[in-house]
Amino acid sequence: MSPTPREILITNDDGIEADGIHVLASIMRRYGNVTVVAPLHHQSGKSAALSLDTRLYLRQIKDEPGLREYTFNGTPVDCVKIGINECWPEGRLPDLVVSGINHGSNCSVASLYSGTLGACIEGTVYDIPSIGFSICTHDPHPDFSPVTAFADTIMEKFLACPPEKGVYLNINFPSIPASEIRGIRMARRGYGRWVKEFDTCKDENGQTYYIMAGHFENHEKEGSIGDHWIVKDGYISIVPHRIDNTDYSEVERLRKVWEQ
């Protein structure tokens, strides 16, 4: 008897119309049955946000052997939740949650804001192995060859040695031709932040409004294992993130002060 195919839930934060999610779905069909539940509209920067007190509509737009596609007018986390709750029979969870391919870097501090990774957090909450893919360009029609060239290597290793419980993987691809990729490197989240984060504008009534902008201020020396440097050097970076972000050594240090 042949084994039951894997059930793979895919989402993103760029929305159902983004190129990246359809490239990702075509890759993942090699590994099982794919169910895409994608935001109806762009949801970048939503992190692990939920749509509370909002009417949410799940609409199926494709149904063919091995591939189902739905839109959902919520956040990436909403999409994972509705997929888990409505797209499989009660008691059956997807075997994998895969998020992306994000158009834009999720290195360094961007990982805190990322809706792509918010979806991975939600999958990990359900103890489902979860992985996020990002390509470091905001081009709406990028060259995805770095992803397609290395996807099978990454997925084979991911399936053979999945992250431990409570951990998901954040993978960032340089936006360079696949032939120029130097390899795959494990990394840690880089250290830096965005500064001068708003452009000031005037509306037609003369009122001031703000558009988020800014630039990344790097706080690490070149050659570190921060993910943004790894990618800049032409490698694919892989950062394992843990959803329990408690600092246990700090718990012990502060206990001496607080617990008297």
Image (cartoon, helix red, strand yellow):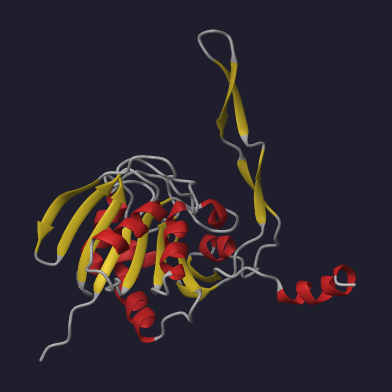
Residue 147 lies, with reference to residue 38, above or below; the image says below
Task: Report the residue at 66% width, 59% height from top.
Answer: 191
From what the image shows, is residue 192 above or below residue 122?
A: above
Tell me: residue 63, above or below residue 92: above
Residue 90 visible in the picture:
yes
The residue located at (50%, 9%) in the rendering is 204
Q: Could you say which quadrant of the image residue 80 lies in? A: bottom left
Residue 28 relative to residue 204: left or right: left
Q: Measured from the top left, where is residue 205 in percent x and y?
A: 54, 7
**Residue lying furthest bottom in this view?**
1
Q: Nearer the viewer, residue 241 or 105?
A: 241
Which of the 4 quarters of the picture holds residue 179?
bottom left
Q: How many marks?
A: 0
Decide if residue 35 is on the left or right side of residue 126: left
Q: Measuring from the top left, give residue 260's x and y in whole percent.
A: 90, 72
Q: What residue appears at the point 24 percent right and 66 percent down from the top-left corner?
A: 27
Residue 128 occupies quadrant: bottom left
Residue 214 at x, y = what percent? 61, 38
